[in-house]
Amino acid sequence: MTDLALHLLLFLFIVGFLAGFIDSIAGGGGLLTIPAMLIAGIPPLQTLGSNKLQSMFGSSSATIAYARKGHVQLKTQLPMAAISVASGAVGAYVATYVPGDVLKALLPFLLVAIAAYFALKPNMSDVDSHQRMSPLIFSLTMAPLIGFYDGVFGPGTGSFLMLAFVSLAGFGMLKATAHTKLLNFGSNIGAFAVFLFNGVVLWKVGIVMGVGQFLGAQTGSRFAMKSGAKLIKPLLVITCVALAAKLILDPTNPIRVWMGF
């Protein structure tokens, strides 16, 4: 399937804008884009491939916006981003061979735990806190692990990165958000390269949604930089809970299948 009616492309553009806005602040844009593409009649494999293309627009847009304001130093963070590219590619390759049922079953509970952490943790702000892991160790552990997950499955990657940057790297909320977008951009590139090699990218869909993503991410990142933790924290909690609920309510969720619901 390569051609969509104009009204469906307009629908996907709007979804891309909304996803870019949300994703640039709290992650979870895939909560909107993947179901939207499936609703539009795009086959699942092409949906995954095209989703990575449009996601690159949003994550790159947000990264540029944050970097321009000095919230992320691109030159010093490039090695970590390169690791994320490689791990995202490996994850996408593995995804073509390994079923994701276990990840689908565990993910809702992990997302609820992340939401609880951010909701209940007091004094969370944009000020950096105690660093529990050095930048080198973080680059060699968290960056490849989460990048690999993004390639294998994807949903919740931004939330996992936020948790790692805040709890382990000691970043404030705004700085963590900025660096999350950089690493997410890296893993998107790696995974996209694999999907492109396998010929499952719909360029028209990906570019139309990508333009919406780019504009939405520019808007969302400006809101985040203006409001900081006051906006990022509640939106992150809401996004995690919403994504967990969507996954649990999905009729194809392994938990529902295993329990006969």
Image (cartoon, grey):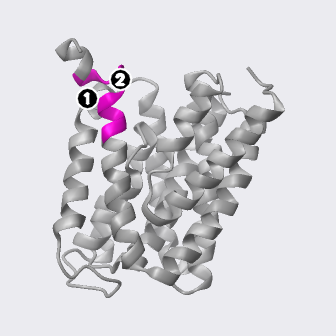
Q: Position of residue 108 (x, y in %)?
A: 26, 40
The image quarter in which residue 49 lies: top right
Q: Amino acid at mark 2?
A: Pro
Q: Visible in this render: residue 37?
A: yes
Please identify the residue farthest to the top as the structure is shown. Answer: 260
Q: Position of residue 50 (x, y in %)?
A: 64, 37
Q: Which residue is under mark 2?
A: 99
> How far apart, in angstroms, are the residues tagged by discs 2 and 1?
8 Å
The answer to whether 237 is drawn above or below residue 253 in the figure is below
Q: Relative to the observer, which residue lies in front, 187 or 211?
A: 211
The answer to whether 76 is drawn above or below residue 48 in the figure is below
Element type where label 2 sits in the image:
loop
Q: Total number of numbered labels?
A: 2
Q: Find residue 82 and name its label.
A: none
Quadrant that contains the N terminus:
top right
Q: Which residue is under mark 1?
A: 102
Q: Are marks 2 and 1 in contact (CB under 8 Å)?
A: yes
Q: Amino acid at mark 1?
A: Val
Point out the stretch of residues depicted in magenta: 245-255
Residue 20 shown left or right of residue 259 in the figure: right
Q: Position of residue 58 (x, y in %)?
A: 61, 58
The answer to whether 188 is drawn above or below residue 194 in the figure is below
Residue at 45% x, 42% y: name it. Answer: 151
The image quarter in which residue 259 lies: top left
How many other residues sit within 10 Å of disc 2, few (<14), some (14-19) or many (≥20)? Answer: few
Q: Is residue 260 magenta?
A: no
Q: Is residue 247 magenta?
A: yes
The image quarter in which residue 122 lies: bottom left
